[in-house]
Every structure is written in structure tokens, then in C-alpha cells.
Image (tube, grey):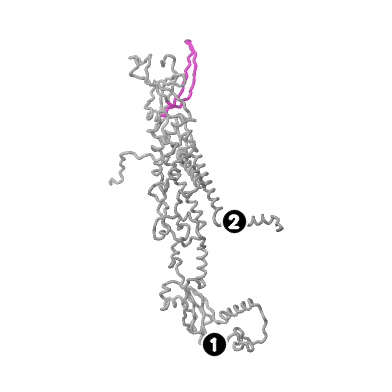
């Protein structure tokens, strides 16, 4: 059989026909502009320093958490819910927010990586990042995940303090 | 409102129109470099400055000091160049309308890919000049050319008319004239395969015989008078006006040439058919007058190679320095509309751009629509103005002005001169 019809995988994949670097850059530019100039919601991101935090050997908890220098980040913050439960021990109020980070802005411009367990300050309150997900691919391209959605819950008093 | 500063600055891949342009960037950004390249014959420092100023104009008009414009300054420079060329195009169209009928047959020109006039055999006399800027003499060359054609048709001007004869044989009605002429020693070189155009067919008899057998007996004259035309068999004469006499003479001559000839003919393709059938004792030779139509482009007249329509008018791009303030403002507005179109193209590739948790719809479609609308309006505005300013229109306006002035003066009471 002739080899003429055999397909060989190219060394590098061809560029996308519709969404290439320029288009992705435009999306980033529009995102930066909207998030930072139009919406303008800012948070302070407190990355917990594993090296400088004394955590329990067995349970992994740290009563006092040390963090690296906080970073101001523009993000899309949405108020999610507030639930209040009454127990024999008193009233327990849980407040949740979601924070949408622009991934390329964080990683390319601010050298910042979002992690579960880090804390953020929005307004006067502190929130702990509980879960992270990357729900959006830019125009369906798996390598172009551009959003980090963080589900956060308000930190209980004493859990995280800034002196 | 001050512009919030992105901190840290997001320069990684952002394309944002700067608030001001830079002269050093102009030439590399424009596609044709007609006005911006220093080696170009149309180079203009004022164009470069104008293009730089256009950046600030676009920046302000599209709100660049409030939100980013996803344009480069190169986009603006390119739009500015296109705008100047568009203006040049419309003005040249207008001037072509003005002068074409006078310029037909004039020297044409050769152009490079940018529309610059090139030196060459036909354009040497125009090298370095811009006929688009000149106020031409009115030559009526088209009308004159038509007149020449009409004149040539009746044997005037430089047309060449031929005459020849062929023998007719008793009993033979059909003669292939094309063949007879084309194969004759006298005409074969001139005809050389071309068709001939028969203008006149006639035969001759001896003049003395015509007088002898002529009109109304021919031998009589008026009493003892024998002046020209007084051949008659009567002695009473009615006086008539001279024009009537002339008309009679023409009718008389016409009758001699046609009605009295006894023969007629018809042409079928190349053949002439004589009526009645030639007979013994009739004319032995027929004469024809004919011409040999040449190709309309085949001429020693150099004007055949000259301007023949709008395309061959030697009109180059307008020099930037010769565009007045009216044109400059049109150019600014048109360039702004072009920039808006480019921005619209950028913003409309994606109808909706995702942002974290949301998506945002950009105004690209609206920008495109507005830009097209503005461009059309600007073109129409200029075209309408120019249409009112053609030489023909201006003559009409002048005539109206004079007519209306006369109407006004008609209402003014005449003064009585009191000394």
C-alpha cells in the first residue's frame, strides 16, 4: 500500500482558525478594563505561608496563621447567601460570597495563584476560600481556562486576624 | 474624570490607542506611503503632522480618555491616508466631469501603483505637474471631433474620397463593386481588404449633348436674351423672390441628377444591381464615388492615442499641500469614521465576550453601523456640493443670477434725468 495517503501528525498543531493569540489577548484586555475600570471591586488576597505557619503535626490546623504580603486584586465579587442557625450554644451565622478571578491577570501580571485555604478581605470582612473551580473555557478551548471561581465563607472571629 | 490606572500595568497584550501620535511612527504604519515617505514625489511633512494630530482627535472623540480604544496609532495613520486618498478620488472625479469633454485627445499619462504620474513618452510634458489643479481652457474637443466625423462623411476636412468607374455590359445587371475596386490596380493598395463605402453612383454623357437635348427642348432661349438659365420655350415671365428661384434651381438640379438619369440601382451586400437591365446604346460605363472607412483608432493623428475617457485623464493623487481647509476638515471627519469602523470590526468579532461570572456584549455592531453611516453621509455631502459646482452648473447659476438681477432691476423706478 502506498504511503502517500498516510497522515502524519504535524510537529506543532496549526493555530486555531477563529480564536488565536490576538483574540485571546483582546478578551484579556476587555476583561481587565471591565473588571478594574468599570466594575472596580477590589479584594485583598492573603496567601497563607506554609513555611511561616506553625500548624499541628497531626491535624494540620494552625491556630495562628502567617501570611505573605497581601495583594490587592480586582475581581468580580458576588454576595451568595447568609444563613443563620440557632443552636443550644447560640446563634450561628454563615455568610458566603463567590469571587470570580481573571486567571490571566493574576498569573501573568501579578504572579499570584489562588489556593483553597487562603483568605481574602472584602470590605471589612475576611473570608476563607473553601472551594475553587475553573468553570469557563474561552470559546471552548480547554487550554484557555480564564476564570477561577472561588466559593468563600466568612471567617469566624479568631480564625484569621490581621494585626 | 481621571483614568484609573491598572496596577500593576497590564501591558502584556493590551492594545490601547495612545492619547497622542508620534511622527516617527507614521510612515511605517500607512499602507501606501504616498504622502509620508520622504522619497515619494508626493511627500508632505504637513501630512505627517496631520496624521499625528488625528490620533489626538480620534482619542478624544471616541472617549479614549475614559475607556480604552482597542486601536493602534497605526490604524489612525492608515485611516488618515485613506481619507486623503478618498478625498483626492472624489475631487478628481468631479474635475474629470468638468474637463473631460475638453480634454479628449489631450496628452494622457502613465501612473505607478500608487497613482503617481510617471515620466514617459506620453506624459513628459506633464511630468511634475498636476492637471487636477489647473483651470483648463475650454476646447470643446469632443464636439469638434464629432464635427470632424460628420464633415468627413460628406467629403470635407481630411477625409479621402475616391472615384472610379467600371464598364457595364449589355444584359448584365449585377456587378461586384467590392471585388472590382479591390482588384483594380489603382485602388487595391488602399483597399487592402477593407470594405468600401459607396457614396454616389452616376454615369456621364457628353456635356454638349446634354445642352442639346436639355430641358424644355433645350434649343430655345428667352427672346433675344441668352443669359444663364433663360432656356425656355415661352416669352412671358413671372417675377419671383430670389429664394424661390434658388429653391427652384435646386429642385431642377436634383431632377436632372436623379429623375432624368433613367437608371437606378440597389446595393445587395457587395453587389450593385442596375435597373433597368443595361442595353446596347445605353451608358457603357458607370462612375462611383466611394470612401474607404478606416478603423477608428487607425490614424496618424496623435490625439487618437490621447485622453479618451476618465481613465486616461492625467490626474494624479492630489498634493496634500493643495488641499484647503474645507478639504482638510472633511478628511479629519472621514478618518474618524474610518477609525470607528476599524474599532467596530475589532469589537464585533465576538458578539459577547466572557468575563468572570458573566459575559459582556461589546458595541462593535453599533460602531460599524454608525461608521458606515457617517462615511456615506460624508461622501454624499461632498458629492452633492461638488455636483453643484461643476462648470456647467456654475454657468447655469450665473445665468440665473443675471436673470434674477434683471427682474430686480425691472422693479426699480427709472429716474428722470433732470440735468
Residue B320 lies, in percent from the top left, at 45, 48
Q: In this view, does A62 lie to the left or right of A35?
A: left
SS category of the residue bearing label 1: helix
Report crowding for label 1: few under 14, some 14 to 19, many 20 or more residues within 10 A (C-alpha): few
- Camera-side residue of B346 and B134: B134
Q: In this view, does B226 lie to the left or right of B199?
A: right
Tag in front: 1 or 2: 2
The span shown in magenta is A73-102
Residue, disc 2: B398
Give the residue drawn at x 39%, y 25%: A114
Residue B69 appears anywhere in the view? yes
Residue, disc 1: B209
Residue A160 appears anywhere in the view? no
User: How far apart are labels 1 and 2 at the CA level?
Assistant: 65 Å
Q: Mark 1 lies on which chain?
A: B
From this view, report whether residue B415 is shown above or below residue A29: below
Amino acid at each position: 500500500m502506498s504511503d502517500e495517503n498516510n497522515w502524519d501528525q504535524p510537529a506543532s498543531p496549526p493555530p486555531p482558525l477563529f480564536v488565536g493569540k490576538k483574540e485571546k489577548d483582546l478578551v484579556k484586555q476587555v476583561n481587565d478594563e471591565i473588571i478594574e475600570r468599570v466594575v472596580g471591586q477590589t479584594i485583598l488576597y492573603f496567601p497563607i505561608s506554609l513555611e511561616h505557619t506553625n500548624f499541628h503535626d497531626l491535624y494540620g490546623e494552625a491556630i495562628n496563621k502567617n501570611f505573605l504580603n497581601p495583594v490587592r486584586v480586582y475581581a468580580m465579587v458576588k454576595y451568595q447567601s447568609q444563613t443563620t442557625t440557632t443552636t443550644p450554644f447560640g446563634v450561628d451565622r454563615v455568610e458566603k460570597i463567590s469571587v470570580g478571578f481573571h486567571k490571566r491577570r493574576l498569573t501573568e501580571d501579578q504572579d499570584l495563584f489562588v489556593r483553597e485555604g487562603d483568605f481574602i478581605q472584602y470590605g471589612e470582612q475576611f473570608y476563607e476560600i473553601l472551594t475553587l473551580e475553573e468553570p469557563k473555557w474561552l470559546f471552548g478551548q480547554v487550554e484557555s481556562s480564564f476564570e477561577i471561581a472561588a466559593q468563600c465563607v466568612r471567617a469566624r472571629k479568631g480564625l484569621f486576624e490581621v494585626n | 474624570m481621571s483614568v484609573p490606572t491598572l496596577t500593576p500595568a497590564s501591558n502584556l497584550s493590551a492594545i490601547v490607542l495612545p492619547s497622542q501620535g508620534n511622527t516617527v511612527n507614521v510612515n511605517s504604519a500607512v499602507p501606501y506611503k504616498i504622502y509620508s515617505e520622504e522619497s515619494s514625489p508626493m511627500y508632505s511633512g504637513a501630512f505627517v503632522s496631520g496624521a499625528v494630530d488625528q490620533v489626538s482627535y480620534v482619542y478624544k472623540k471616541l472617549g479614549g480618555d475614559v475607556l480604552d480604544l482597542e486601536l493602534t496609532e497605526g490604524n489612525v495613520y492608515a485611516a488618515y491616508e485613506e481619507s486623503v486618498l478618498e478625498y483626492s478620488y472624489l475631487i478628481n472625479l468631479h474635475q474629470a466631469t468638468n474637463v473631460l469633454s475638453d480634454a479628449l485627445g489631450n496628452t494622457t499619462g502613465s501612473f505607478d501603483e500608487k497613482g503617481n504620474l510617471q515620466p514617459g513618452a506620453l506624459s513628459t510634458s506633464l511630468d511634475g505637474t498636476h492637471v487636477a489643479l489647473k483651470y483648463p481652457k475650454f476646447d470643446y474637443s469632443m464636439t469638434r471631433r464629432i464635427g470632424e466625423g460628420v464633415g468627413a462623411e460628406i467629403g470635407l476636412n481630411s477625409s479621402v474620397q475616391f472615384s472610379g468607374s467600371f464598364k457595364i455590359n449589355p444584359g448584365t445587371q449585377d456587378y461586384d463593386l467590392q471585388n472590382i475596386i479591390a482588384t483594380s490596380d489603382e485602388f487595391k493598395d488602399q483597399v487592402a481588404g477593407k470594405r468600401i463605402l459607396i457614396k454616389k453612383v452616376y454615369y456621364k454623357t457628353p456635356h454638349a449633348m446634354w445642352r442639346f437635348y436639355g430641358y424644355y427642348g433645350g434649343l430655345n432661349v428667352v427672346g433675344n436674351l441668352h443669359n444663364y438659365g433663360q432656356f425656355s420655350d415661352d416669352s412671358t415671365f413671372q417675377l419671383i423672390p430670389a429664394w424661390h428661384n434658388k429653391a427652384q434651381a435646386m429642385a431642377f438640379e436634383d431632377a436632372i441628377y436623379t429623375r432624368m438619369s433613367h437608371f437606378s440601382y440597389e446595393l445587395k451586400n457587395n453587389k450593385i444591381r442596375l435597373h433597368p437591365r443595361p442595353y446596347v446604346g445605353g451608358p457603357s460605363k458607370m462612375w462611383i464615388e466611394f470612401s474607404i472607412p478606416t478603423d477608428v483608432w487607425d490614424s496618424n493623428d496623435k490625439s487618437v492615442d490621447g485622453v479618451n475617457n476618465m481613465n486616461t485623464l492625467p490626474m494624479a493623487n492630489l498634493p496634500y499641500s493643495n488641499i484647503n481647509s474645507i478639504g482638510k476638515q472633511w478628511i479629519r471627519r472621514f478618518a474618524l469614521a474610518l477609525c470607528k469602523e476599524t474599532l467596530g470590526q475589532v469589537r464585533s468579532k465576538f458578539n459577547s465576550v466572557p468575563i468572570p461570572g458573566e459575559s459582556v456584549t461589546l458595541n462593535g455592531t453599533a460602531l460599524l453601523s454608525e461608521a458606515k453611516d457617517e462615511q456615506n453621509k460624508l461622501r454624499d455631502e461632498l458629492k452633492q456640493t461638488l455636483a453643484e459646482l461643476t462648470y456647467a452648473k456654475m454657468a447655469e447659476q450665473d445665468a440665473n443670477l443675471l436673470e434674477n438681477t434683471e427682474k430686480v432691476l425691472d422693479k426699480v423706478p427709472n429716474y428722470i434725468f433732470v440735468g
